[in-house]
Image (tube, grey):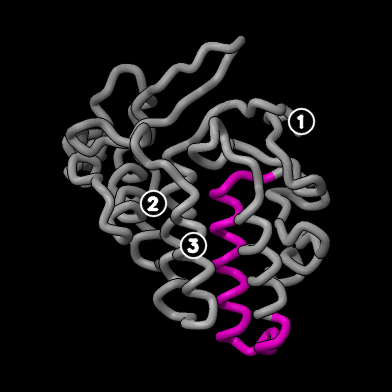
Amino acid sequence: AWKYIENNFNEKTGLINAAHKFPSAATWDWANGIFAIFAAKKFHIIDEDRYDEMMNKFLTQMQKIPLFNNELPNKTYNVQKAKMSDYRNKLQEDGIGWSAADFARFLQSLNLIEQCEPNHAPAVEKLLLRFNFCRTFSVDGDMYGGTLHHGKLSIAHEALTGYEEYLSRGFNLWNLPGREAREYKFLKEVEVYGIKIPTDTRPFFSNFIESEPFWFLGFE
């Protein structure tokens, strides 16, 4: 697992590829990277100097990386150039929008560093000041993402049941709203061959519920 990080960490930009040798990534992927670098230090896979080098490169880059509408991280970035891109990794000067779900997990990883690594805490706290969180929530505290298409921005509710409740904790860790997103209010159990299966009741989402967010809740 660590070999993947070694092979896909860009020494110039301090960013990590989402897929092997493909220089594109979202903030969800960088959360994975932060967790991995932190774990590598704890398991003595890397020493303190290498840890600090990698974390400093990443946090320094995040201080200057372009944001969508100067508000929030874009949905995807070109890792080699540290610039906003689309899902084909084609540079997009205006970006393509933001993902509240990806951003929430990124906030969780940053909170880990802020709480556990005093040397890096000031850089993390400074980074948080770059972001404008206003459009990531409804008044009630549900998470919303934005998509820019042909110059028009559409804002929509994000995340399936399970993911929504897990990810809202990323905002809660920084004392940001997200109360409604934690309520499992769209959860309904359906009996299939005598087994109760959790489903999401919203008609505009897939109605299945995955195990991944519940694993994340336990691990992280």
For disc 1, the marked residue is 91
The picture places residue 186, in percent across and down from the top left corner, at: 20, 32
Q: Residues within 10 Å of mark 1 (few under 14, many from 20)?
A: some
The picture places residue 77, in percent across and down from the top left corner, at: 68, 41
State if disc 3 and disc 2 touch (CB < 8 Å). Answer: no
For disc 3, the marked residue is 126
The picture places residue 114, in percent across and down from the top left corner, at: 44, 72
Q: Is residue 130 above or below residue 174?
A: above
As measured in the structure, the alpha-carbon distance from the residue carrying label 1 to the one carrying label 2 is: 31 Å
Q: Is residue 74 left or right of residue 219?
A: right
Name the quadrant containing residue 214.
Answer: bottom left
As measured in the structure, the alpha-carbon distance from the residue carrying label 1 to the one carrying label 3 is: 27 Å
Instruction: Inspect this view and state whether residue 62 appears.
Output: yes
Frontmost residue, 146 versus 212: 146
Residue located 64% across and 71% down the image:
55
Frontmost residue, 19 versus 140: 140
Frontmost residue, 63 versus 217: 63
| Residue 30 falls inside the magenta stretch | yes
Q: Which mark is residue 70?
A: none
Residue located 39% across and 43% down the image:
210
Q: Which mark is residue 213?
A: 2
Q: Residues within 10 Å of mark 3 (few under 14, many from 20)?
A: few
The picture places residue 144, in percent across and down from the top left corner, at: 36, 31
Element type where label 3 sits in the image: helix
Magenta segment, prevailing SS (helix, strand or loop): helix
Q: Amino acid at mark 2?
A: Pro
Q: Amino acid at mark 3?
A: Lys
